[in-house]
Image (spheres, rainbow, N blue to C red):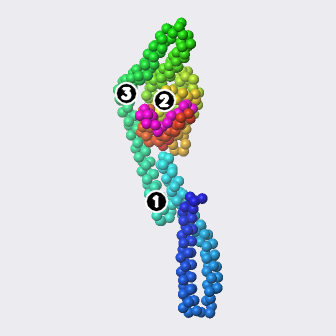
Amino acid sequence: MLKRLNTIRYAYIRSHLYSLFLTTVTLLAILLSIHVLFQPNWLSAPSIFLFSLLYVFLAFIFSFYIGFKSSGDMKERLDYLSVLIAQLARGNYSSRVYDNDDDEIARIGSELNELGEKMQSQVKSLQRLADEKAEFAKTAHKAATIEERQRLARDLHDAVSQQLFALTMMSQASLRLFDRNPEQAKEQMKDISSTALKAQTEMRALLLHLRPVHLSGEPLRVGIQQLVDELKQKCQIDFHIQIEEVDELSESKAEHLFRIVQESLSNTLRHADASEVTVEIVKRSNELFTHIADNGKGFDIESDQQKKTSYGLKTMKERSEEIGGTFAIRSKQGEGTHIDIRIPL
């Protein structure tokens, strides 16, 4: 209630009531001065009192009515500006506000329209630069492949290799314990099974990175569907896919989106322990909306440890911004992870 009283409409009403108060005090001062100095017969104390009450009553009603009506147009125009600012903040830079008046609010609307045009122009420049960058990236494909292989080799050594070494040591220990202490050997076999499953998941995530960086001329929908079909054969995850054909999507944008989805699925395989994954890419108005979600264990985005190790999330965010898009991630312990990407078309 208090918040509503601070709106511009009630500010107008307060200003009228303040004017009423000052006018009433001034009239009372004048009438009382005439009554004291000249003492006319027609101006008595009861008449002053009656006139003041009648004036305050009528003026109070008129102040509310006029203040409410006169602020309607101002509130509506400010609401238009608020909606425009919200649209610009969401990345919809083609939104405009039209105001034919010649005052300060119309000037602010015109300046916001110019800001939207400049931001739209900058997005187009970013997308053009992304296209040029994609051409340069193709020429440097061999060097990138070598670097990727070196990174995969490091990951294999740091993760899978160590897990396989642990499996070897644990299996040898289980063999020695099998005759002496079958129960303890059985517990170790459970640990071996769990470690083997982790190594298998890690290997699948690493193999996911071995897929081509480019779509090789295929549509984005086909490339992602092939990727998901391959994963369905190797892991027990239920995929829900909805991808629309978008003619306005350039080759560089499609490749960036493909790599973002690829990186996201890799992170899901490695860390999420999810049983369901949703990938949705649809066109909404003048933008492409991408939603990637899983029902895994989630994580604390704000934790220091997560900020240090979230290389994949940083890469996805950078790829989104390179094509003029916005990247948002929501996650919480035990509630899965949701990624939303909006790219202007």
Which quadrant of the figure has residue 241? top right
The numbered dot on residue 144 is 3
Which element carries disc 2, helix, strand or loop?
helix
Which residue is nearer to you in this view: 30 or 243? 30
Q: Quadrant of residue 30?
A: bottom right
Q: Quickly name the residue at label 1.
A: 108
Q: Position of residue 98 (x, y in %)?
A: 51, 58
Q: Position of residue 216 (x, y in %)?
A: 45, 27
Above/below status of 327 relative to 259: below
The magenta stretch is 295-310
Camera-nearest residue between 96 and 292 = 292
- Left or right of residue 17: residue 88: left
Which is more foreground, mark 2 or mark 3? 2
Q: Are marks 2 and 1 in contact (CB under 8 Å)?
A: no
Of the numbered discs 1 and 3, the one sitting upstream in the chain is: 1
Q: What residue appears at the point 56 percent right and 13 percent down from the top-left corner?
A: 183
The amino acid type of the residue labelled 3 equals Ala
User: Residue, x 49% and y 8% (percent of image)?
Assistant: 176
Reading the image, the residue beneath label 2 is: 267
Residue at (53, 7) in percent of width and height: 180
Give residue 181's mark: none
- Tell me which amino acid carries mark 2: Asn
Quadrant position of the N terminus in the picture: bottom right
Q: Name the residue located 46 percent from the left edge and 55 percent from the top edge.
A: 113
**Cα distance in 3D space between marks 1 and 3:** 48 Å
Magenta-colored stretch includes residue 309: yes
Question: Is residue 271 located in the magenta-colored stretch of the structure?
Answer: no
